[in-house]
Image (cartoon, rainbow, N blue to C red):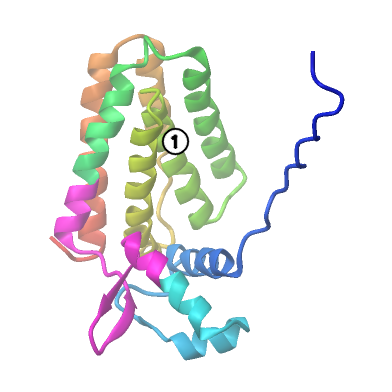
Protein backbone atom coordinates (compact mmCIF):
# COMPACT_ATOMS: atom_id res chain seq x y z
CA UNK A 1 0.00 0.00 0.00
CA UNK A 2 1.42 3.39 -0.97
CA UNK A 3 2.40 5.90 1.69
CA UNK A 4 -0.10 8.82 1.58
CA UNK A 5 2.61 11.12 2.94
CA UNK A 6 5.18 10.29 0.26
CA UNK A 7 5.82 13.11 -2.23
CA UNK A 8 3.88 12.91 -5.47
CA UNK A 9 5.95 12.14 -8.55
CA UNK A 10 6.74 15.13 -10.69
CA UNK A 11 4.34 15.45 -13.62
CA UNK A 12 5.67 14.26 -16.94
CA UNK A 13 6.32 16.96 -19.46
CA UNK A 14 6.97 16.70 -23.16
CA UNK A 15 9.49 19.23 -24.34
CA UNK A 16 8.66 20.92 -27.66
CA UNK A 17 11.12 20.35 -30.49
CA UNK A 18 14.15 22.58 -30.15
CA UNK A 19 14.93 25.26 -32.71
CA UNK A 20 17.90 23.18 -33.88
CA UNK A 21 15.62 20.18 -34.43
CA UNK A 22 13.15 22.30 -36.39
CA UNK A 23 15.87 23.73 -38.62
CA UNK A 24 17.33 20.25 -39.14
CA UNK A 25 13.91 18.90 -40.12
CA UNK A 26 13.40 21.78 -42.57
CA UNK A 27 16.76 21.15 -44.20
CA UNK A 28 16.04 17.42 -44.49
CA UNK A 29 12.74 18.25 -46.17
CA UNK A 30 14.44 20.55 -48.67
CA UNK A 31 17.05 17.89 -49.47
CA UNK A 32 14.59 15.00 -49.73
CA UNK A 33 12.23 17.01 -51.93
CA UNK A 34 15.03 18.17 -54.21
CA UNK A 35 14.89 21.85 -53.30
CA UNK A 36 18.56 21.62 -52.33
CA UNK A 37 20.43 19.79 -55.07
CA UNK A 38 23.30 17.40 -54.53
CA UNK A 39 26.59 19.28 -54.44
CA UNK A 40 24.99 22.65 -53.78
CA UNK A 41 26.45 24.74 -50.90
CA UNK A 42 24.42 25.48 -47.79
CA UNK A 43 25.21 29.05 -46.75
CA UNK A 44 24.94 29.59 -43.00
CA UNK A 45 24.33 33.33 -43.12
CA UNK A 46 21.70 33.24 -45.87
CA UNK A 47 19.92 30.30 -44.27
CA UNK A 48 19.93 31.89 -40.81
CA UNK A 49 18.46 35.09 -42.25
CA UNK A 50 15.82 33.19 -44.26
CA UNK A 51 14.71 31.12 -41.26
CA UNK A 52 15.08 33.89 -38.70
CA UNK A 53 17.45 31.96 -36.46
CA UNK A 54 21.00 32.42 -35.18
CA UNK A 55 23.96 31.22 -37.23
CA UNK A 56 24.93 28.94 -34.35
CA UNK A 57 21.56 27.19 -34.67
CA UNK A 58 22.12 26.60 -38.38
CA UNK A 59 25.65 25.40 -37.67
CA UNK A 60 24.36 22.79 -35.20
CA UNK A 61 21.69 21.64 -37.65
CA UNK A 62 24.31 21.23 -40.37
CA UNK A 63 26.46 19.17 -38.02
CA UNK A 64 23.52 16.77 -37.62
CA UNK A 65 23.07 16.51 -41.39
CA UNK A 66 26.77 15.79 -41.88
CA UNK A 67 26.59 13.04 -39.25
CA UNK A 68 23.58 11.54 -41.08
CA UNK A 69 25.45 11.54 -44.38
CA UNK A 70 23.05 14.01 -45.99
CA UNK A 71 25.70 16.73 -46.25
CA UNK A 72 29.47 16.99 -46.37
CA UNK A 73 31.85 19.49 -44.77
CA UNK A 74 35.19 20.38 -46.32
CA UNK A 75 37.89 22.82 -45.14
CA UNK A 76 37.57 26.26 -46.75
CA UNK A 77 34.47 25.10 -48.66
CA UNK A 78 31.87 24.85 -45.94
CA UNK A 79 28.92 22.47 -46.07
CA UNK A 80 27.38 21.09 -49.25
CA UNK A 81 24.48 18.75 -49.90
CA UNK A 82 25.73 15.20 -50.39
CA UNK A 83 26.03 14.20 -54.03
CA UNK A 84 25.02 10.62 -54.87
CA UNK A 85 27.92 8.49 -56.03
CA UNK A 86 27.77 5.14 -57.77
CA UNK A 87 29.63 3.32 -55.00
CA UNK A 88 27.40 4.64 -52.24
CA UNK A 89 24.19 3.86 -54.17
CA UNK A 90 25.36 0.29 -54.73
CA UNK A 91 26.43 -0.10 -51.11
CA UNK A 92 23.11 1.19 -49.77
CA UNK A 93 21.11 -1.15 -51.99
CA UNK A 94 23.23 -4.16 -51.01
CA UNK A 95 22.99 -3.34 -47.32
CA UNK A 96 19.23 -3.03 -47.71
CA UNK A 97 19.12 -6.50 -49.25
CA UNK A 98 20.78 -7.96 -46.15
CA UNK A 99 18.36 -6.23 -43.78
CA UNK A 100 15.17 -6.66 -45.80
CA UNK A 101 16.11 -10.22 -46.71
CA UNK A 102 16.44 -11.00 -43.01
CA UNK A 103 12.92 -9.70 -42.50
CA UNK A 104 11.46 -11.67 -45.40
CA UNK A 105 13.07 -14.82 -44.02
CA UNK A 106 11.30 -14.24 -40.69
CA UNK A 107 7.81 -13.77 -42.15
CA UNK A 108 6.43 -17.10 -40.94
CA UNK A 109 7.78 -16.73 -37.39
CA UNK A 110 7.23 -12.99 -37.01
CA UNK A 111 4.49 -11.76 -34.65
CA UNK A 112 1.16 -11.12 -36.33
CA UNK A 113 1.49 -7.43 -35.45
CA UNK A 114 4.67 -7.21 -37.53
CA UNK A 115 3.05 -8.92 -40.50
CA UNK A 116 0.05 -6.59 -40.14
CA UNK A 117 2.43 -3.61 -40.22
CA UNK A 118 3.75 -4.80 -43.60
CA UNK A 119 0.21 -5.10 -44.96
CA UNK A 120 -0.74 -1.67 -43.63
CA UNK A 121 2.38 -0.06 -45.10
CA UNK A 122 1.55 -1.49 -48.52
CA UNK A 123 -2.09 -0.42 -48.22
CA UNK A 124 -0.96 3.13 -47.46
CA UNK A 125 1.31 3.03 -50.49
CA UNK A 126 -1.34 1.74 -52.89
CA UNK A 127 -3.86 4.26 -51.52
CA UNK A 128 -1.41 7.10 -52.17
CA UNK A 129 -1.01 5.85 -55.74
CA UNK A 130 -4.78 5.68 -56.24
CA UNK A 131 -5.17 9.19 -54.81
CA UNK A 132 -2.58 10.60 -57.19
CA UNK A 133 -0.04 11.35 -54.47
CA UNK A 134 3.00 13.48 -55.19
CA UNK A 135 6.30 11.92 -56.22
CA UNK A 136 7.67 12.70 -52.76
CA UNK A 137 4.71 11.04 -51.03
CA UNK A 138 5.01 7.92 -53.16
CA UNK A 139 8.70 7.70 -52.32
CA UNK A 140 7.89 8.01 -48.61
CA UNK A 141 5.22 5.30 -48.78
CA UNK A 142 7.38 3.07 -50.95
CA UNK A 143 10.34 3.21 -48.60
CA UNK A 144 8.13 2.85 -45.51
CA UNK A 145 7.02 -0.51 -46.92
CA UNK A 146 10.63 -1.63 -47.18
CA UNK A 147 11.32 -0.51 -43.60
CA UNK A 148 8.32 -2.56 -42.46
CA UNK A 149 9.95 -5.67 -43.97
CA UNK A 150 12.92 -5.19 -41.64
CA UNK A 151 10.45 -4.84 -38.78
CA UNK A 152 9.69 -8.55 -39.26
CA UNK A 153 13.06 -9.30 -37.65
CA UNK A 154 11.84 -7.89 -34.33
CA UNK A 155 15.09 -5.94 -33.98
CA UNK A 156 14.79 -2.18 -33.34
CA UNK A 157 18.50 -1.83 -34.13
CA UNK A 158 18.10 -3.37 -37.57
CA UNK A 159 15.09 -1.14 -38.22
CA UNK A 160 17.15 1.90 -37.22
CA UNK A 161 19.88 0.81 -39.62
CA UNK A 162 17.35 0.48 -42.44
CA UNK A 163 15.92 3.92 -41.66
CA UNK A 164 19.43 5.38 -41.86
CA UNK A 165 19.99 3.72 -45.24
CA UNK A 166 16.64 4.99 -46.47
CA UNK A 167 17.67 8.50 -45.44
CA UNK A 168 20.75 8.25 -47.64
CA UNK A 169 18.72 6.81 -50.49
CA UNK A 170 16.27 9.71 -50.37
CA UNK A 171 19.05 12.07 -51.43
CA UNK A 172 19.54 10.04 -54.61
CA UNK A 173 15.78 9.69 -55.16
CA UNK A 174 15.36 13.46 -54.91
CA UNK A 175 17.76 13.77 -57.85
CA UNK A 176 15.85 11.06 -59.74
CA UNK A 177 12.61 12.95 -59.08
CA UNK A 178 13.92 15.96 -60.97
CA UNK A 179 14.96 13.75 -63.88
CA UNK A 180 11.83 11.60 -63.92
CA UNK A 181 8.88 13.64 -62.78
CA UNK A 182 6.59 11.12 -64.50
CA UNK A 183 8.21 8.07 -62.89
CA UNK A 184 5.74 5.21 -62.57
CA UNK A 185 4.95 3.74 -59.19
CA UNK A 186 5.84 0.18 -58.25
CA UNK A 187 2.83 -0.69 -56.13
CA UNK A 188 1.96 -3.75 -58.22
CA UNK A 189 5.49 -5.09 -57.77
CA UNK A 190 5.18 -4.84 -54.01
CA UNK A 191 1.78 -6.50 -54.05
CA UNK A 192 3.38 -9.45 -55.84
CA UNK A 193 6.04 -9.67 -53.14
CA UNK A 194 3.44 -9.64 -50.38
CA UNK A 195 1.44 -12.34 -52.19
CA UNK A 196 4.47 -14.62 -52.12
CA UNK A 197 4.88 -14.03 -48.40
CA UNK A 198 1.21 -14.65 -47.71
CA UNK A 199 1.51 -17.94 -49.62
CA UNK A 200 4.43 -18.93 -47.39
CA UNK A 201 6.86 -19.05 -50.33
CA UNK A 202 9.69 -17.16 -48.62
CA UNK A 203 12.29 -18.67 -50.95
CA UNK A 204 10.63 -17.12 -54.00
CA UNK A 205 10.08 -13.93 -52.02
CA UNK A 206 13.82 -13.73 -51.36
CA UNK A 207 14.58 -14.14 -55.07
CA UNK A 208 11.93 -11.55 -55.90
CA UNK A 209 13.39 -9.07 -53.39
CA UNK A 210 16.91 -9.61 -54.72
CA UNK A 211 15.80 -8.87 -58.28
CA UNK A 212 13.70 -5.91 -57.16
CA UNK A 213 16.53 -4.19 -55.29
CA UNK A 214 19.01 -4.92 -58.09
CA UNK A 215 16.60 -3.29 -60.53
CA UNK A 216 16.13 -0.29 -58.23
CA UNK A 217 19.90 0.12 -57.99
CA UNK A 218 20.28 0.11 -61.76
CA UNK A 219 17.38 2.52 -62.27
CA UNK A 220 18.94 5.07 -59.92
CA UNK A 221 22.40 4.71 -61.44
CA UNK A 222 21.06 5.09 -64.97
CA UNK A 223 18.83 8.05 -64.07
CA UNK A 224 21.78 9.87 -62.52
CA UNK A 225 24.17 8.82 -65.30
CA UNK A 226 26.40 7.05 -62.77
CA UNK A 227 26.82 3.77 -64.63
**Residue 80 percent coordinates (x, y):** 32, 78
Residue 84 on the magenta span: yes
Residue 118 on the magenta span: no
Give the residue at x 49% y 78%.
58
Q: Secondary structure at mark 1?
A: helix
- Between 219 and 163, the residue placed more toward the observer is 163
Give the quarter of the figure containing the C terminus.
bottom left
Q: Name the image quarter holding residue 188.
A: top left
* Residue behind mark 1: 145
> Which residue of the protein is positioned furthest toward the right in this rendering?
4
Say whether residue 35 is visible: no
Please report the bounds of the magenta region as a residue range.
63-92
Say whether residue 12 is visible: yes
Looking at the image, residue 176 lies above or below residue 195 = below
Looking at the image, residue 139 lies above or below residue 162 = below
**Residue 218 percent coordinates (x, y):** 20, 50
Q: Is residue 123 left or right of residue 173?
A: right
Give the residue at x 33% y 56%.
168
**Residue 138 percent coordinates (x, y):** 49, 48
Give the residue at x 53% y 36%.
126
Q: Is residue 155 left or right of residue 20?
A: left
For label 1, count other residues whose C-alpha is less than 10 Å away and answer few (under 14), some (14-19) or many (20+).
many
Looking at the image, residue 93 lies above or below residue 126 = below
Amino acid sequence: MSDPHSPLPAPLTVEPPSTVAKVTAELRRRIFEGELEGGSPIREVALADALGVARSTVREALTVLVAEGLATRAPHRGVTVARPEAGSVRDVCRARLVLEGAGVGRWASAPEASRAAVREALTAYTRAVADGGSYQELNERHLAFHVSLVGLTGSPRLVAMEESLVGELKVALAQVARLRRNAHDQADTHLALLDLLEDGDTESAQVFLTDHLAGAEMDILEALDLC
